[in-house]
Image: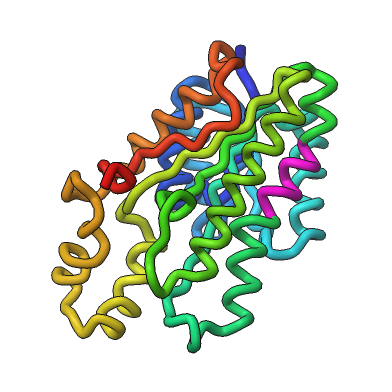
């Protein structure tokens, strides 16, 4: 059965790979992203796979823009069957230098936005006795690293939200799960590299090898396509008894 899928942050990185994976199966997609060429990226994917689509550049830091995004999706498609909360931001700084505005923005986008989007999709999913909510969390939802206080806090919180939604959704065939990637080479990683080079006094290559991938048993970046495959697995109708889990896709990081 063809479904309607909303993927936040779906015009680059992991989100784009997830959008392409769903598009290949013919699902209707609400693309979302803040890239200047986001509308063009969405249109090109939709054209390539002959799917119905909508594009939004809502800033999910602001609840009113989230509400507008969901309202537009509902007007176009009736409702959202599968929600993938992928959009996220990061900032790297020691605790005593961490700006409060960065803390608030990271918690807002990484945790509050998934809560509000899940809430706004809830009535449609309950009515139709079907829903799949998938959060793109992080290995940092299960372990911690220094200089990432807000990010680690937001992703730990997202796993707690995942479990609560799973319990509340169970009577209505609404599942909620999280995928916890290790390091995927995406724009969010590129933005971290300069800060980490400064903090650790290392070259870019040294940061990648000795900081980013140091904790992974598999010494390579995780592919965005692998994350997309995990999402597809959790989104399928047959995965109705898999709910409330945090699925690590992190190269053996948390095994250590």
Residue at x 62% of width, y 32% of height: 176
206 displayed left or right of 104: left
Visual colour scheme: rainbow
Q: Is residue 82 visible?
A: yes
Q: Position of residue 91 (x, y in %)?
A: 47, 73
Q: Is residue 39 visible?
A: no
Q: Position of residue 141 (x, y in %)?
A: 48, 51
Residue at x 35% of width, y 63% of height: 189
Let me know if residue 116 is in the magenta part.
yes
- Predominant secondary structure in magenta? helix
Q: Which quadrant, please, contains the N terminus?
A: top right
32 displayed left or right of 77: left
Let me know if residue 34 is in the magenta part.
no
Observer-nearest of 63 and 174? 174
Q: Farthest residue in the front direction?
A: 256
In the displayed structure, 158 sits above or below 62; it is above
Observer-nearest of 136 and 49? 136
Observer-nearest of 66 and 206? 206
Q: Farthest residue in the bottom direction?
A: 97
User: How many labels, in total?
Assistant: 0
Q: Position of residue 198 (x, y in %)?
A: 28, 85
Magenta residues?
113-121
190 displayed left or right of 158: left
Q: Position of residue 194 (x, y in %)?
A: 31, 78
Residue at x 26% of width, y 47% of height: 256
């Amino acid at each position: 059965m063809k479904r309607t899928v909303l993927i936040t942050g779906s015009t680059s990185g992991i989100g784009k790979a997830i959008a392409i994976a769903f598009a290949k199966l013919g699902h209707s997609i609400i693309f979302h992203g803040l890239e200047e060429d986001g509308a063009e990226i969405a249109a090109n994917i939709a054209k390539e796979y002959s799917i119905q689509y909508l594009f939004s550049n809502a800033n999910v830091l602001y609840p009113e823009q989230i509400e507008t995004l969901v309202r537009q999706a509902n007007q176009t498609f009736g409702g959202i069957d599968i929600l993938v909360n992928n959009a996220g931001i990061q900032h790297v700084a020691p605790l005593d230098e961490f700006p409060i505005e960065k803390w608030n923005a990271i918690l807002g986008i990484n945790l509050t936005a998934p809560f509000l989007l899940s809430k706004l999709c809830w009535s449609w999913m309950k009515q139709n006795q079907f829903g799949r909510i998938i959060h793109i969390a992080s290995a940092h939802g299960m372990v911690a690293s220094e200089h990432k206080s807000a990010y680690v806090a937001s992703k730990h919180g997202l796993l707690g939200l995942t479990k609560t939604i799973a319990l509340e959704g169970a009577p209505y065939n609404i599942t909620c799960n999280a995928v916890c990637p290790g390091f995927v080479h995406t724009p969010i990683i590129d933005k971290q590299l300069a800060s980490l080079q400064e903090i650790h006094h290392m070259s870019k290559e040294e940061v990648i090898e000795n900081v980013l991938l140091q904790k992974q048993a598999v010494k390579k970046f995780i592919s965005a396509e692998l994350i997309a495959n995990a999402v597809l697995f959790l989104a399928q109708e047959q995965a109705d008894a898999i709910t409330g889990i945090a699925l690590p896709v992190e190269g053996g990081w948390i095994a250590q």
